Amino acid sequence: MTSKSAAAAARATVYGYPRQGGGRELKKAIEGYWKGRVDADALRATAAELRRTNWRQLAEAGIHEVPTGDFSYYDHVLDTSVMVGAIPGRHRAAVEADALDGYFAMARGTQDVAPLEMTKWFDTNYHYLVPELGPDTMFTADSAKQVAELREALALGLTARPVLVGPVTYLLLAKPAPGVAADFDPLTLLDRLLPVYAEVLSDLRAAGAEWVQLDEPALVQDRTPAELNAATRAYRDLGALTDRPKLLVASYFDRLGDALPVLAKAPVEGLALDFTEAAAANLDALAAVGGLPGKRLVAGVVNGRNIWVNDLTKSLATLGTLLGLADRVDVAASCSLLHVPLDATAERDIEPQILRWLAFARQKTAEIVTLAKGLAQGTGSITGELAANRAALASRANSPITRDPAVRARVGAVTDADARRSQPYGERAAAQRAHLGLPLLPTTTIGSFPQTAELRVARADLRAGRIDTAGYEERIRAEIQEVISFQEKTGLDVLVHGEAERNDMVQYFAEQLTGYLATQHGWVQSYGTRYVRPPILAGDISRPEPMTVRWTTYAQSLTRRPVKGMLTGPVTMLAWSFVRDDQPLGDTARQVALALRDEVNDLETAGTSVIQVDEPALRETLPLRAADRPGYLAWATEAFRLTTAGVRPDTQIHTHMCYAEFGDIVQAIDDLDADVISLEAARSHMQVARELAAHGYPREAGPGVYDIHSPRVPSADEAAALLRKGLEAIPAERLWVNPDCGLKTRGWPETRASLDNLVAAAHAVRAELPTAD
């Protein structure tokens, strides 16, 4: 096919769309179901209406082919486990008794049964439920959800393309089930899994699917020859099926590398590739393999993970280059739009000049449609859109909001010494033990306590003017008093003030730093019904005044036990924001680090002896390709040290990380030079403690013994058993006892019971130690 006819065939599509609805209707319906206020039929009706609304919006915007199957009550990887019958043994009875309740039990657990492990989806802040597989796993097809949602879209008269997690990525994301040998490789189950995918594909074809998308993002990571061979076999076998739809294999988040020729040669009808800056090498690599003759190419030229307007002229140039490399070139975002908010026009508090720089899911959809039109009909058909786009890009580039000479001068003056503590850890540890006087196995929490309905109402009343600042602060003081009193009665050793005044661990700080913008409706799913509003990092960063000192100092005035100061670290401030794309991330990280350094120093001056700088995003932001990691880790660890290195030796610096694979970054954890690190460990059965020990990590650590992402209350015996596992890897003089993460999302009854059991477990195990009094 000629380039001209390839351009004429250009169509607009997306891989996925935000699930929650404009008013977070899905969150409200699901949580209502959990609390018994919404029945199953009403929940399903809400979900169906949200799907219809999404599809209609996409079609009305000009999207030619809408995705189905991307909608989920909790997580699309969990949906895939249901689709292939990979139900953990401990959950089978619940699933058989009631499929919906069993589904949520796998996601959240019950009092008696632990949930599936949860971790980050590649280098995003979305969390997925990790499949548990073993040599005895037998797969069975259950295509009901995928078929039903396809039929819903077809009934609306739409062209629809089901989207499934591909079989290779599904197995590469899986872990050995509890009780299975740790060296079991789930990929050995591929030949057992492929017939199930074949059955699902046949069912979708029978239901009317012309195309099915199989997502294989795991192939953008470094893969062994055996793993690449598995991809070859998978798409050889699926491609050879006679009773199937056309197959579109999709990758995103990075370049495909050695996997590109594998997929280009596979007997499938199309590939979807990321052509944004992060994966620009895909273009040259595609040309090097001779393109995709006779196949469909879906070009992800609109960044699906950030919120800045697309450079339409640049994207059109990329699309034009691609025309000669495939039989048909369609236009899409680089990945599912799940990772961005729904609609920028809902933001009434952002200045119109700045709002024109932003593109949320609906605006990105419009960009995709514009690009497809320009590709098919020529740039003359979109002259107005191109002119508006150039004006928006120029407005942002020339705005004084984006540059502060004083901030840039301060960053330029940073030296290596600024990012180093004044004494080595061994000397600091002795000074801290003498200063703090803590027992062996000291107990603490990660920071936040339950954000009650009363707190949320008080915050809303303040925004609406129903109460004044004095009334709101009185409510916060009362909450801090209650949190401190509870912790003292429970017997925790190092306390926290509970963060009652904070709406979100990133947003709270962003609202007090220059250079950040806050949204009112920019919700993005983090996991399940947990949605966050990532702030927008638009300009240079500085701290006009102290942000946490007043409330931390107040909490310390209520107790003689040490109260931790709580800050969010520079990498997490970037990772959980929509970060600017007009300068290197390392430069932005140093700006944030210097602003936070001022806060750390002010906390110490005010008498705070323990300061926690959370970096849960350090691992999730790790580049997917090993070759890109050293540069990232160099500036990321430097930024943490730049934040924390200005304190005295006897001030104890903590950090926290959660829900990620830590084995890849143990050296980086060491390089942070924090005195104490707390990490998620309950769902992974203390795996991280073993990883730290294998590395020879020399500092103190608190691998979590209480999984806070489940409503179940762990018994004291259960917490003690995990603590003993921790002691097998980390000596008692360096082991802390704490939950996996903050308690913001939990209720007070379960929090009280769980922390009582945590302290009881610490006391029981402490009494077993030969050095105990």
Image: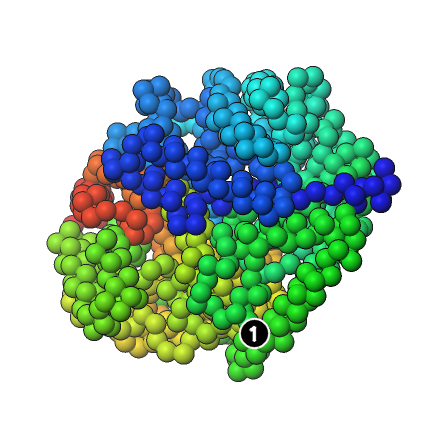
Question: Is residue 368 among the parts visible in the rendering?
Answer: yes
Q: Quadrant of residue 261?
A: top right
Q: Residue at x 33, y 60 (%)?
A: 503
Front residue of 446/342: it is 342
Q: Residue at x 36, y 28 (%)?
A: 100
The percent coordinates of residue 695 (x first, y second) are: 48, 47
Q: Quadrant of residue 3?
A: top right
Q: Quick check: 395 above or below 107?
A: below
Question: Is residue 80 among the parts visible in the rendering?
Answer: no
Q: Quick check: 741 above or below 229?
A: below
Front residue of 108/5: it is 5
Is 524 situated left or right of 220 in this image? left
Q: Quick check: 208 above or below 529?
A: above
Q: Which residue is label 1 attached to?
A: 402
The percent coordinates of residue 573 (x first, y second) are: 46, 62
Amino acid type of the residue that numbered disc 1 sits on in the rendered structure: Thr
The percent coordinates of residue 29 (x first, y second) are: 34, 40
The percent coordinates of residue 640 (x first, y second) are: 46, 64
Tag count: 1
Q: Quick check: 432 above or below 618?
A: below
Q: Residue at x 26, y 29 (%)?
A: 112
**Image quarter hosting the N terminus:** top right
